[in-house]
């Protein structure tokens, strides 16, 4: 069980405590946390996060393989199976990484912006 966060803050439950997450919702929050935080941005947790923010610095032909590598590296501590990692681009030029994974008895598909 994990405390629910919204915009970096814990969400109150109205009774003096905080909302909690379980199962797929808990997994989704942890995975998004790991993928959206730039790797190395927490001095005491240097392995936390991903390098997806660096994706657009590489050659376009290398980006799909790097996206898969960065996702696998960020989610290594989690008990998940990564089924697929797809890379598309927005009209604004940023990369959108879509990840399909299985864990905690559920299958999730989520997208995160990478770079830009």
Image (cartoon, helix red, strand yellow):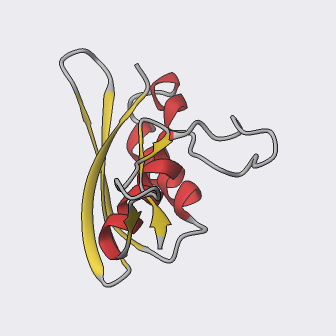
> Residue at the location (47% across, 40% down)?
36
Position of 10 compared to 61: left or right? right
Q: How many marks?
A: 0
Q: Nearer the viewer, residue 76 or 64?
A: 76
Q: Quadrant of the C terminus?
A: top left
> Residue at the location (80% across, 39% down)?
43
Q: Residue furthest right?
A: 44
Rendering coords of residue 60 (x, y %): 39, 29
Q: Residue furthest bottom?
A: 105
Q: Is residue 114 above or below residue 18?
A: above
Q: Is residue 103 above or below residue 61?
A: below
Quarter occupied by residue 89: top left
> Residue at the location (52% across, 23% down)?
57
Q: Is residue 104 above or below residue 65?
A: below
> Residue at the location (56% across, 45% down)?
50
Quarter occupied by residue 112: top left
Rendering coords of residue 81 (x, y %): 41, 75
């Amino acid at each position: 069980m994990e405390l629910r966060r919204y915009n970096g803050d814990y969400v109150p439950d109205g009774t003096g405590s905080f909302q909690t997450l379980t199962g797929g919702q808990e997994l989704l929050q942890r995975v998004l946390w790991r993928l959206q935080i730039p790797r190395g941005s927490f001095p005491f947790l240097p392995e936390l996060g991903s390098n997806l923010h660096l994706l657009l610095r590489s050659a376009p032909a290398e980006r799909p393989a790097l996206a898969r590598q960065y996702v696998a590296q960020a989610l290594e501590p989690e008990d998940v199976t990564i089924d697929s990692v797809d890379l598309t681009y927005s009209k604004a030029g940023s990369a959108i990484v879509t990840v399909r994974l299985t864990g905690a008895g559920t299958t999730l598909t989520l997208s995160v912006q990478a770079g830009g």
